[in-house]
Image (cartoon, rainbow, N blue to C red):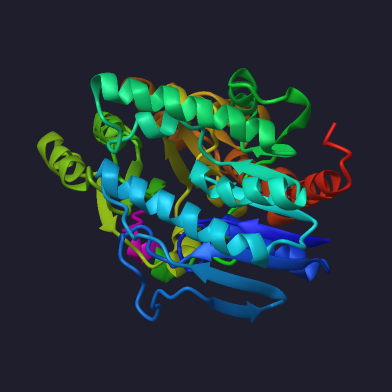
Amino acid sequence: MRVGIVSQFYAPEPAFIPASLAGELARRGHEVRVLTGYPNYPSGRVYPGYRQRWRDVTESGGVRLRRVPLYPSHDTSTLRRAANYLSFAVSSTAAGVRYLSDVDVVYVYHPPATSFTAAWLLRVLHRVPAVLHVQDVWPDSVTASAMSPAGRAGRAVHTALGAVMRRIYAAASSIAVIAPSMRELVVERGADPGKVEVVLNWTDETLFRPVRATAQARAAIGHRGRRVVMHAGNIGPFQHIEGAVRAAAAVAGSTPLDLVVVGSGTEDRAVRSLAGQLGADNVRFLGRRDPAEMAALYAAADYQLVSLKDLPIFRGTIPSKLPAALACGSPVVVAAPGDCARMVEGTGVGLSCPPENWPELAAGFRRAAALPEGQRSDMARRARDSYQRHMSLKAGVDALEIMLDAARTGRGTR
């Protein structure tokens, strides 16, 4: 197949799904052309070594890549973020009319929804089918964010984006979603149920893989012969790390367990302050670490924490932290709603607690600390096996390859 990939975000930005998909499709013998912007996420500044210009085409590993200019911004300004999304829609559509005119099928990575503009025009002009890969459900994820206006203006944005998404769902030949409940929501929003498939996200397998725990990594996390639960990732309002700190403080005097927090974010200072106020000497903060270190840090810990607030937008998603942990063969302690908790419970890869309920999470920490090593090791083996079977790069690309070929031939996905 000749496959076009349209994604506003692409390596070296931390959006590895489009790049790993492109590389794997090329390794399988497909001709792959990528249309993307200049890297500027998450700082909102174009990365060093890149200079925006109209025509920038490179080829590597069988993947031909063209970058087009956009307005770089990733702050909370509604206008600047809209300019970021719309500028890529304009430039990618202008370039894509010729660059992707003879492909057999187009894959579109969403968000943002505006990335579908080029695919829509290719469908109109050249009858090129498109597969939409939904990572966030719009308009919900937009109107729940800081970039959305409040009040009547916010409601107007929600209504307008909802109408846009219905048109996009109708125009796509097939739609891949990343969780079962997301499928239900997309169908509820107007998508034909016969063309929506669940394809679980994989992780960056060059970074997250099973490794042996080293003395250096144990020292880095301050291991002191107790069970270690690690949160690695963003420390923001949605992760509810405050609850994890309260839970850890509640078991500090009775349970041999430490909570290690790796990463940074807008709530970093607040949760550090909270740990100090609570006298939680079993909570340690490591700050941001090089991604190349993370597999070793995962191996040095006993469990990975997956924590999210109990919001509707999270009930139909699988946070990226889960496949990363499972790929490393790490059991998880989950305090998240919906599909994430159900998946952990159904596969036996960890312990599940209700979200936003720190006393229940404290009880989960106690269970994690008390679990015999043999049972924890069994969880670890199931974690790795579950990842390989259902979440790996191979499993995901197998499913997307079938969808792309079905769209190309007009067979549909069901």
Q: Is residue 323 left or right of residue 101?
A: left
Quadrant for the N terminus, please.
Answer: bottom right
Residue 93 drawn at (x, y percent) = 56, 56
Examine the rendered structure and indicate whether residue 224 appears above or below residue 352: below
Q: Which residues are magenta?
A: 218-225
Q: Is residue 223 magenta?
A: yes
Determine the main secondary structure of the stretch shown in magenta.
loop
Instruction: Tell me the residue at 35%/37% (across/down).
Output: 239
Q: Nearer the viewer, residue 40 or 383?
A: 40
Examine the rendered structure and indicate whether residue 358 appears above or below residue 46: above
Splitting the image into 4 quarters, where does residue 248 fall?
top left
Residue 344 drawn at (x, y percent) = 59, 32
Q: Is residue 128 visible?
A: yes
Residue 293 drawn at (x, y percent) = 44, 67
Q: Is residue 218 left or right of residue 411?
A: left
Q: Which residue occupies the extreme front position in the image?
A: 125
